[in-house]
Amino acid sequence: MGVFFPRLVDFGFARKFGVEAIWLQAVPFALAHIGKPEIETLSTIFGGFAFGWLAWRTKSFIYPLLLHWFVSSFTIIVAAGLPG
């Protein structure tokens, strides 16, 4: 499901709830991260909002998808100690 589900929720709810759909899609985005490290899980409600806002502004889920991929990859690289 990953990043695709919130984008579908965002655009599906947008017709009925308008800009409030950004917050509505942030909740399942955060729930999808339960089981990850605590700081990551807690930060996802704001990250979900940011990704939702980006999807809303660009009318596409591609940009949040690419941003999520970049952040995830960067986090894995740093956690593995590869950049230094």
Image: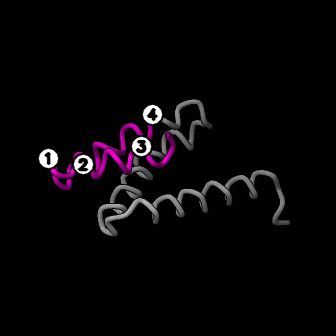
Expressed as whole percent of the image width and height from the top left, the position of residue 10 reads: 30, 50
Q: Circle 3 is placed at which residue position?
A: 5
Does the residue at mark 1 contact the one at mark 4 (Cβ under 8 Å)? no
Q: Secondary structure at mark 4?
A: helix
Residue at image position (83%, 56%) is 81
Q: Secondary structure at mark 3?
A: helix
Total numbered labels placed on residues in the image: 4
Q: Circle 1 is placed at which residue position?
A: 16
Quick one: label 1 or label 4, which is nearer the N terminus? 1
Residue at image position (36%, 39%) is 27
Camera-nearest residue between 19 and 83: 19
Residue at image position (48%, 40%) is 42
**Per the image, is 4 magenta?**
yes
Which region shows up in magenta?
A: 1-30
Task: Give me the C-alpha separation between circle 3 and circle 1.
Answer: 17 Å
Query: Mark 4 packing: few (<14 Cα in 10 Å), some, or many (20+)?
Result: few
Does the residue at mark 2 contact the one at mark 4 (Cβ under 8 Å)? no
Looking at the rendered structure, the kind of residue marked 1 is: Lys
